[in-house]
Image (cartoon, rainbow, N blue to C red):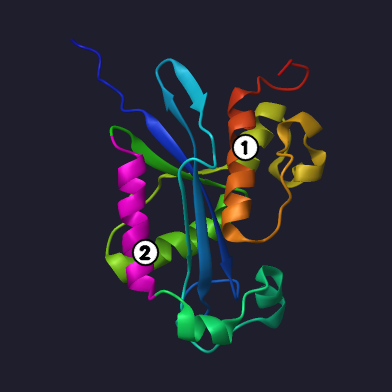
Amino acid sequence: MAARRIKPSRYISVDIEADGPIPGPYSMLSIGAAVAGVQDGDGFTAADPEEHTFYRELRPIGEEFVPEALAVSGLDRERLKAEGSEPATALTEFSEWVREVSAGAQPVMCGYPASYDWTFLYWYLIRFTGASPFGHSGCLDMKTLYATKAGLPLRAVAKGTMPRELLSRRRHTHHALDDAVEQAELFANLMEWQGPGSPR
């Protein structure tokens, strides 16, 4: 019996900024994405995270917001009401971009932590486009990846606990594209890392 051919995975670092804890009552205000690399049967190959990127700012979908959450992003809701992309347009463009950069591979969203960003991303994709280019489960959490490789409980993991050489040298700015690029570098480093005590 012939071995089943496994499609490569194209990892896409995604970061979103939102004005509250959950989608629906609250709004995703921006989305940034950067191709982090590809994994096939021969291993992982990192990409230049600045080569293939996506960024949009979105019109809020409601009036509710948490001031503290909004302050993190530094985005102006009033400006976005006038100038932000319609969510259906932005998410359709995002889906098309994901399919384009993932030609010949299966796209996988990766985030740090993935849980928050994936919650908004998947909800918005289904609500405004009816489908997700990642499917319903195509996401990978960088905190879990590090915890597994380091042999640590998940709750013990924070970027400050990671070896410095794994971290990107870029600043975490809370601009969605900046952070997607920064986290793409972290992801590539984690994929190549063999665990504690291993040379990089």
Vertical placement of residue 146 versus 85, above or below? above
88 magenta-colored: yes
Q: Is residue 167 left or right of residue 1?
A: right
Residue 101, which numbered label? none
**Residue 93 location in percent, x, y?**
34, 60
Residue 166 can be seen in this image: yes
Q: Is residue 133 left or right of residue 168?
A: left
Q: Which residue range is magenta in the image?
A: 86-103
122 magenta-colored: no
Residue marked by disc 2: 91
Helix, strand or loop at label 1? It is helix
Q: Residue at 57% across / 50% down in the picture? A: 180
How far apart in space, not on screen, are marks 2 and 1 (Cα)?
24 Å
Residue marked by disc 1: 185
Q: Residue at 60% across / 76% down in the picture? A: 19
Q: Amino acid at mark 1?
A: Glu
